[in-house]
């Protein structure tokens, strides 16, 4: 009875309602279920919905409800489940036709929600300037990103059919005031942040020396421009001071 009830709610057009349940009541259950899920996803992925239009959007919603088996029981993680569903559509023979940027756009729109729900950062934010010899770290609430498509520009009036020659690099960040922001970046900046993350308590001087070796850039110039960049990212709560070694180890 439960399986028949759930199957009808997920896809009323293909699965008959269980017997002995008043059709009017069953229709209310199905409508409430669909509207709750659709409205939650539409509020997060409003650009994707606008790009697809109502018909394709609702067809995508019905496919998600019908075919996706969620791993999480939490409504707050519904958008992440939807992202997983979109990412797996390419493997389905009967997958609906979607724009080539759909998964990246979905991920970009999901980030704001994910950062707002993320646990508070276990680090201190301040405005005192960094120096070359002080260990630094990447804030747990700063996520470097690379997209093939310019996701922040996509909308009903701009839908690229193929990725541009240059990738889009961004940093998604939740700052000390719990405001989510997206910071434009480039490949070199993201590589520097990756080096900082890998170094675990490394100093700007050490990380910039590695970057200079990788890029054959003059170390003296890179130290000057790189430290200025890190201080700007520090003021934006992307880069923070690394905790003392004993705290980091614990």
Image: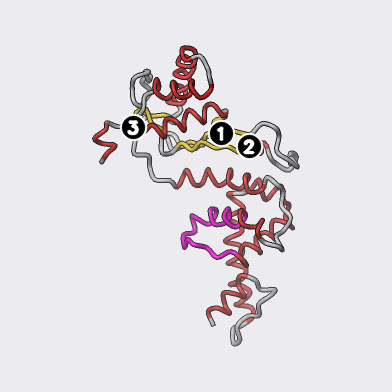
- Front of the two marks 3 and 1: 1
Res 138 quadrant in image: top left
| Residue 149 seen from this side | yes
x and y percentages locating residue 76 in the rendered image: 48, 55
Disc 3 target residue:
124
- Front of the two marks 2 and 1: 1
| The one of 89 and 207 positioned closer to us in this rendering | 207
Disc 1 target residue:
170
**Element type where label 1 sits in the image:** strand
Q: Residue at x 60, y 72 (%)?
A: 9
x and y percentages locating residue 239 in the rendered image: 42, 29
Work out whether 79 lies above or below 245. Answer: below
Tags 2 and 1 in contact by the CB under 8 Å rule?
Answer: yes
Residue 152: assigned label: 2
Q: Is residue 115 magenta?
A: no
Dot 1 alpha-carbon crowd within 10 angstroms: few under 14, some 14 to 19, many 20 or more: many
Residue 44: assigned label: none
x and y percentages locating residue 241 in the rendered image: 35, 28
* Part of the protein shown in magenta: 68-86
Q: Residue at x 70, y 47 (%)?
A: 100
Which one is earlier in the sequence, the residue at label 3 or at label 1?
Answer: 3
Quote the CA–CA distance across marks 2 and 1: 10 Å
Work out whether 244 lies above or below 1. Answer: above
- List the single residue furthest toward the bottom: 20
- Majority secondary structure of the magenta segment? helix
* Horizontal side of residue 77 vs 92, given as left or right: left
**Element type where label 2 sits in the image:** helix
């Amino acid at each position: 009875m439960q399986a028949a009830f759930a199957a009808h709610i997920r896809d009323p057009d293909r699965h008959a309602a269980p017997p002995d349940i008043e059709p009017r009541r069953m229709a209310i259950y199905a409508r409430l279920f669909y509207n709750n899920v659709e409205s939650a996803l539409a509020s997060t992925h409003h650009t994707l919905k606008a790009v697809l239009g109502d018909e394709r959007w609702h067809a995508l919603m019905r496919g998600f409800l019908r075919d996706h088996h969620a791993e999480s029981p939490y409504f707050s993680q519904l958008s992440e489940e939807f992202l997983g569903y979109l990412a797996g559509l390419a493997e389905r023979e009967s997958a609906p036709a979607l724009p080539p940027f759909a998964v990246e756009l979905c991920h970009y729109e999901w980030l704001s929600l994910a950062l707002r729900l993320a646990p508070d950062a276990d680090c201190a934010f301040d405005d005192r300037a960094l120096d070359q010899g002080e260990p630094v770290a990447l804030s747990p609430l700063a996520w470097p990103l690379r997209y093939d498509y310019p996701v922040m520009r996509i909308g009903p009036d701009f839908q690229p059919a193929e990725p541009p020659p240059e990738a889009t690099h961004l940093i998604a960040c939740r700052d000390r005031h719990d405001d989510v922001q997206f910071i434009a970046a480039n490949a070199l900046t993201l590589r520097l942040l990756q080096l900082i993350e890998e170094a675990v308590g490394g100093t700007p001087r050490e990380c910039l020396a590695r970057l200079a070796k990788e890029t054959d850039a003059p170390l003296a110039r890179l130290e000057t421009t790189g430290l200025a960049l890190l201080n700007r990212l520090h003021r934006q709560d992307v880069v923070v001071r690394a905790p003392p070694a004993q705290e980091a180890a614990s």
